[in-house]
Image (cartoon, rainbow, N blue to C red):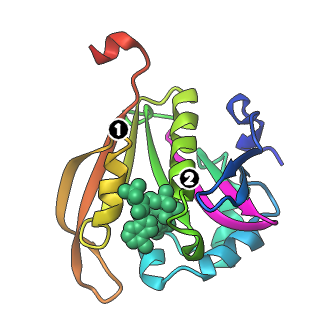
């Protein structure tokens, strides 16, 4: 399959990382054949989290279409594997035309039983590096304000800041509205861009 894994900046994968508890995990780009593992991982997510991840990740049809069309959709997706089981996923979404083509949007998720071991931190740092090697100039993360205050504070440690709050923009499954926080990070390409 001709997927973004053929792109130059993905040549460094697979990579090995060590979690806080000493567990060794492999990270590499998503490829054809990962559909079942992704579906299995998202089965363990609470419904409320899946809702805010934007797409129906419990739908085998959606996952299949997504994995097969990553390049077409201008997405790069990285997974973490432990003994063949997928335990985390990041997605970098880009546009190849227009005023937002310098921006990447990030999504990331760690399987509930593997959280708070540093895996999210590894995955986020890795996808930020990928975005830099792609030449992107800005990253955006969308979060739901009330549900994710600890995640918002954590993301600020990576020099993301709250760019905007859209009040009552998101709707949960029950139809209640919640604020959307738009977090951004500028990726400076030259020292001159910073000073
Ligand atoms: C956000 C997420 C990826 C973090 O993954 P993780 O593997 O737990 O990340 P880390 O172990 O590196 O910890 C990240 C921070 O979250 C905190 N954290 C982890 N699990 C937590 C929990 N259950 N409750 C509160 N905080 C938690 C950690 O303390 C850490 O903060 P610190 O660096 O200030 O100590 C994970 O919680 C997740 O998948 N959430 C659901 C999907 C989501 O909301 N994605 C973000 C928007 S796209």
Q: Is residue 164 left or right of residue 97?
A: left
Q: Position of residue 35 (x, y in %)?
A: 74, 68
User: Residue at left 44%, top 47%?
Assistant: 105
Residue extending furthest toward the left: 167
Q: Nearer the viewer, mark 2 or mark 1?
A: 1
Q: Is residue 58 visible?
A: no
Q: Which residues are magenta?
A: 79-95
Q: Is residue 167 left or right of residue 160?
A: left
**Of 20 and 111, which appears nearest the observer?**
20
**Of 187 and 103, which appears nearest the observer?**
187
* Image vertical order of residue 149 relative to residue 134, above or below: below
Residue hosting label 1:
185
Label 2 sits on a secondary structure element that is strand
Residue hosting label 2:
91
User: Residue at left 58%, top 42%?
Assistant: 126
Q: Within the image, what quadrant is residue 143 found in?
A: bottom left
Q: Is residue 51 left or right of residue 133?
A: left
Q: Position of residue 34 (x, y in %)?
A: 77, 64
Residue extending furthest toward the front: 21
Kindly check if marks 2 and 1 are in contact, taking CB atoms under 8 A apart as contact.
Answer: no
């Amino acid at each position: 399959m001709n997927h973004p894994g053929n792109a130059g900046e993905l040549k460094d994968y697979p990579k090995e990382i060590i979690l806080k508890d000493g567990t060794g995990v492999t990270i590499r780009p998503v490829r054809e054949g990962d559909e079942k593992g992704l579906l299995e991982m998202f089965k363990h997510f609470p419904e409320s989290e899946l809702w805010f991840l934007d797409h129906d990740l419990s739908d085998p049809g959606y996952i299949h279409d997504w994995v097969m069309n990553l390049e077409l959709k201008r997405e790069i997706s990285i997974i973490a594997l432990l003994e063949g089981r997928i335990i985390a996923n990041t997605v970098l979404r880009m546009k190849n035309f227009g005023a937002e083509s310098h921006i990447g949007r990030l999504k990331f998720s760690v399987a509930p039983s593997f959280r708070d071991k540093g895996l999210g931190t590894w995955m986020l740092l890795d996808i930020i590096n990928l975005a830099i090697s792609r030449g992107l100039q800005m990253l955006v993360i969308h979060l739901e304000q009330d549900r994710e205050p600890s995640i918002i504070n954590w993301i600020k440690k990576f020099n993301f800041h709250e760019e905007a709050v859209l009040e009552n923009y998101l709707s949960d499954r029950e139809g209640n509205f919640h604020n959307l926080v738009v977090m951004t990070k500028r990726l400076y390409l030259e020292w001159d861009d910073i000073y």
